[in-house]
Every structure is written in structure tokens, then in C-alpha cells.
Amino acid sequence: MGQLFSGMLGATSNAPAVVVPEHGDRRFHAEDWSSNSWYSLLKQSYLLNARMLEDLVERMLARLTGRVV
């Protein structure tokens, strides 16, 4: 996440994305999500947090069921 915020310090709209939506995810299809630095920060923060929470739930379920992840 530090890479995401340090990229925002430069506030360049053409900086490479730290995380991108999965193929077929149309929620961030509008151009503003990529061209506006603050919208890009919001999008990438959301995607990083969503993935972290999905991983957390998967690991907890694996731990409760005795599966190895």
C-alpha cells in the first residue's frame, strides 16, 4: 500500500497502477477512474482492501476447516 501512496505524492495521472480490476469488472470502466489521480487512488485503495479482505476470509475458512492454503 505504501507504493500506492508514494505514487500519489507525485500526483501524475500516467503513473502505473499498483493494482488493476479483474478482467470483466466494469465498475471502474469510466475514463475518470484512470485519468483523475484522486479517483485512481480511491479505486486502487478499494481494490487492495477488497483483495486483502477476501484473502483474510479464505485463510480463516481454511484454518477452521483444516485446509492448507
Image (cartoon, rainbow, N blue to C red):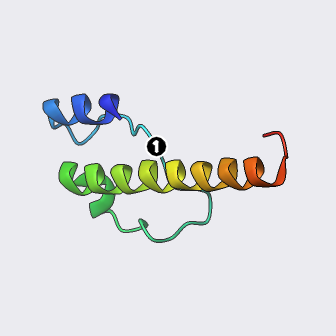
Query: What residue do we see at 84% from left, 47% from top?
Result: 66
Residue sitting at 24 percent across and 35 percent down?
Answer: 5
Q: Quadrant of the C terminus?
A: top right
List x then y, in percent, for residue 59.
68, 47
The secondary structure type at the circle numbered 1 is loop
Amino acid type at image mark 1: Val
Image quadrant where residue 39 sits? bottom left
Percent position (x, y) of residue 2?
31, 29
Q: Which residue is mark 1?
A: 19
In the image, residue 6 sits, relative to residue 46, either above or below, namely above
Q: 26 or 4, which lies in front?
A: 4
Left or right: where 14 falls relative to 24: left
Please state the horizontal and vertical placement of residue 62, each as a whole percent of the image: 76, 50
Label total for image: 1
Q: Is residue 23 left or right of residue 28?
A: right
Answer left or right for 22 relative to 1. right
Q: What x and y, as percent, mark residue 20? A: 48, 48
Q: Is residue 17 above or below residue 10?
A: below
**Residue drawn 36% across the image and 35% down it:** 1
Which quadrant of the structure image shows residue 47?
bottom left
Q: Quadrant of residue 13?
A: top left
Position of residue 57 in the picture relative to residue 16 (left or right): right
Circle 1 Cα neighbour tier, 10 Å, few/some/many (<14 / 14–19 / ≥20): some
Q: Against 54, is 66 above or below?
A: above
